[in-house]
Amino acid sequence: MVTDTGSFRYSSVGPGVLRIAAALLDTGMDHIEIYDRIFDSNRLDQLKLKGYALSEKTVVTGNGNAAYISLSEAELKRFHFHPGDTEGLVNYALGIEGVHIAAFFAEKDDLIKISLRSKGEVDVNEISRKHFGGGGHIHAAGGRSKLSLAETLKKFEGIMAELFAETA
């Protein structure tokens, strides 16, 4: 519930979600331990991967309105990738000042997995459905590409250039 609601900060969080969270607290669950396991328990390689992704692999595009992080299969192997190691990376890109759309691209077995996030009125669900065979909702969506990583990134940059040229 914490991760799916962005720590209760997304617009989809309403009184019902908070009532469920309150009911869970009433059971005596240790919410501090849960938070620690989710956010404060990292392997060293996982932290090094995150640092590398943020310092070396973050790109701003779309006239400053979009950002993305991409990791090749070789880069993931270099940091001994485990499932979940890249969870939340896309949100760092979305947190860049002026950015309204963020994407994370991960290469695995000749397939590119794509995570899209947005804020404001930008509908990443539509972008994902139209261009990457995926879906989700207005502010969070996912998709896939069978193009190479380089070709997928070029495609994304073209979509962002077109999208933000119209609003410029």
Image (cartoon, rainbow, N blue to C red):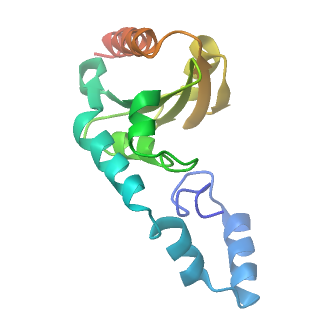
Pick the residue in front: 124 or 54.
54
Left or right relative to 13: residue 54: left
Question: What percent of the width, then of the height, locates residue 47?
Answer: 36, 56
Q: Number of labelled discs?
A: 0
The quarter of the picture where residue 42 lies is bottom left
Seen from the viewer's position, the closer of residues 61 and 76 is: 76
Q: Is residue 92 above or below residue 71?
A: below
Residue 20, placed above or below residue 140: below
* Residue positioned 29% across, 33% down in the render: 57
> Would you say 10 lies left or right of 80 here?
right
Front position in the image: 7 or 50: 50
Q: Residue at x 69, y 86 (%)?
A: 29
User: Residue 140: percent from the left, percent from the top?
Assistant: 57, 38
Residue 17 % position (x, y):
70, 65
Q: Position of residue 21 (x, y in %)?
A: 69, 74
Position of 133 with respect to 147 (left or right) is: right
Image quarter (top left, top right, bottom left or bottom right) of the N terminus: bottom right
Q: Is residue 85 visible?
A: yes
Q: Residue at x 53, y 9 (%)?
A: 147
Say whether residue 107 is left or right of residue 93.
Answer: right
Residue occupying the point 61% across, 24% down: 143
Q: Is residue 138 visible?
A: no
Looking at the rendered image, the quarter that the C terminus falls into is top left
Classify residue 132 by image quadrant.
top right
